[in-house]
Amino acid sequence: MWGFGGRYYWGRKERVERRRAGGGGIILVFAWMSSQEKPLKNYVQLYASLGWDSLVCHSEFLNMFFPEKAATLAHDLLKELVEELKIRPCPVVFSSFSGGPKACMYKVLQTVMSRATLSLDDSFSRSSGLRYGKR
């Protein structure tokens, strides 16, 4: 799927059938900036032979300089990942090539960490009866 700061796609067409049959997890592949699909095909096939699905992200070079573009792509990527994890929870592994972390992966990790922190803070304040700034 084409997004504002790049594109992402599932590496294999038969991912749903294999995952329902009890396959492995999902590998988020962050490709070289401004790369094409062809150089990653061997990696996607390798991961598939091990029973893992690949969600491949191709970022544009300008994402490094315009974080809002990277944030939009990261949001769309996480939305797609969550939809798949709702079908069947499984392990998720991050794999990055060259400039992939600088162009999008860091925004994915920032988003996940900020959501996890909010979640932990909310559960702590509810269970302890404390609110921020109050005793």
Image (cartoon, rainbow, N blue to C red):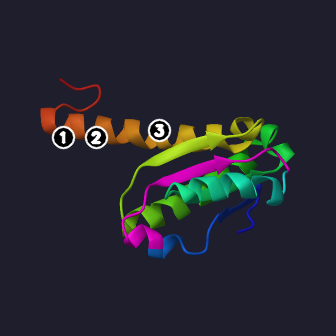
SS at mark 3 in the image? helix
Amino acid on which disc 2 is placed = Asp
Q: Write down the residue under mark 1.
A: 126
Residue at 85% across, 44% down: 62
Give the number of the disc on residue 99: none
| 3 vs 1, front mark | 3
Q: Are marks 3 and 1 in contact (CB under 8 Å)?
A: no
* Badge 3 or badge 1: first in the primary sequence: 3
- Asked if 60 appears above or below 106 in the picture, the reply is below
- Asked if 85 appears above or below 65 in the picture, the reply is below
User: Which quadrant: the C terminus?
Assistant: top left
Residue 26: in magenta span: yes
Q: Are marks 3 and 2 in contact (CB under 8 Å)?
A: no
Residue at 69% across, 54% down: 57
Question: To which quarter of the image does residue 127 belong?
Answer: top left
At label 3, counting other C-alpha atoms closer than 10 Å, the crowd grade (few under 14, some 14-19, many 20 or more) is few
Give the number of the disc on residue 122: 2
Find the distance from the CA under tag 3 to the CA under tag 1: 18 Å
Q: Are marks 1 and 2 in contact (CB under 8 Å)?
A: yes
Q: How far across and down, in percent of the image, does residue 66 sit?
A: 79, 42
Lateral position of residue 21 relative to residue 75, left or right:
left
Who is closer to the viewer here, 46 or 90? 46
Q: How many marks?
A: 3
* Badge 3 or badge 2: first in the primary sequence: 3
Amino acid on which disc 1 is placed = Arg
Q: Which residues are magenta?
A: 18-34
SS at mark 1 in the image? helix
